[in-house]
Image: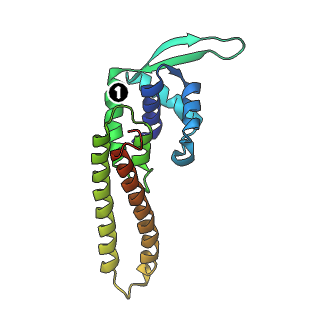
Amino acid sequence: MNIPQFIVLGTLDRISPASGYEIIRDLEKKMVSRWTNVKKGSIYHALKALEKAGLVVQTDRLKQGLYPTSTLYKITAAGREAFDRLQAEAFLGLFPDYLGFKLALKFNVRRTANEIAAFGEKALKKIEAQLAGMDAYVKSLAEDDPRRASDPFFIEHDRMLLKQEKKWIEMAVERIRKGQTQP
């Protein structure tokens, strides 16, 4: 998944039309850069790529005083369809990849609470499968293989991270089902 393109589409789906600067300001308010590592330049690059692909279009160019000209963009119908596909993918992207469930939830506009809860259940099953795979791998290690002696130690770190992600998704799904968090 191209995360800068996903977050640009998600932002334009909510605040369209908007300039690159306005998109960056919105992302800063959401503190997205703290956990996606997307740079400001990536936003402008994503806008150009999305425009070339027909997923966003320019709507206007504004000049205000001494400031540079701002180009306003809006998401197209094809852009909304692409965003919906990427969002479905993001809902199932788990730590340590890029905290996809959180990313998908932060940019949600059209998914219902039931849809989000269903994605959450799928994500939880995926986590359980990953945890089971880690357990199986640790059990399969030969005790006398010095090259693999530290593997269980590092795998335990990954297990801890996945368990925390699982807890967070369970909490998010519970809140969404209770109507305490906007889907």
Camera-nearest residue between 37 and 176: 176
The residue at the point 54 percent across, 38 percent down is 30
Report the side of 137 relative to 26 (left or right).
Answer: left
Q: Which residue is at a point 32% across and 73% down the rendered structure image?
A: 135
Residue found 39% across the figure and 84% down from its top: 145
Quadrant of the frame with the C terminus: top left
Residue underneath mark 1: 80
Disc 1 is placed on an element classified as helix
Residue 134, horizontal then vertical, whole percent: 34, 70
Q: Residue 19 location in percent, x, y?
A: 55, 22
Please say whether residue 93 is visible from this viewpoint.
no
Q: How is the protein colored in the picture?
A: rainbow
Q: Indicate whether 163 appears above or below 121.
A: below
Q: Residues within 10 Å of mark 1 (few under 14, many from 20)?
A: some
Residue 146 figure quarter: bottom left
The x, y position of residue 85, in whole percent, is: 31, 36
Seen in the picture, residue 108 relative to 62 is either above or below; the reply is below
Specify the amino acid type for callout 1: Arg
Q: Residue at x 41, y 68 (%)?
A: 159
**Residue 157, image x, y percentages:** 46, 69
Q: Quadrant of the N terminus?
A: top left
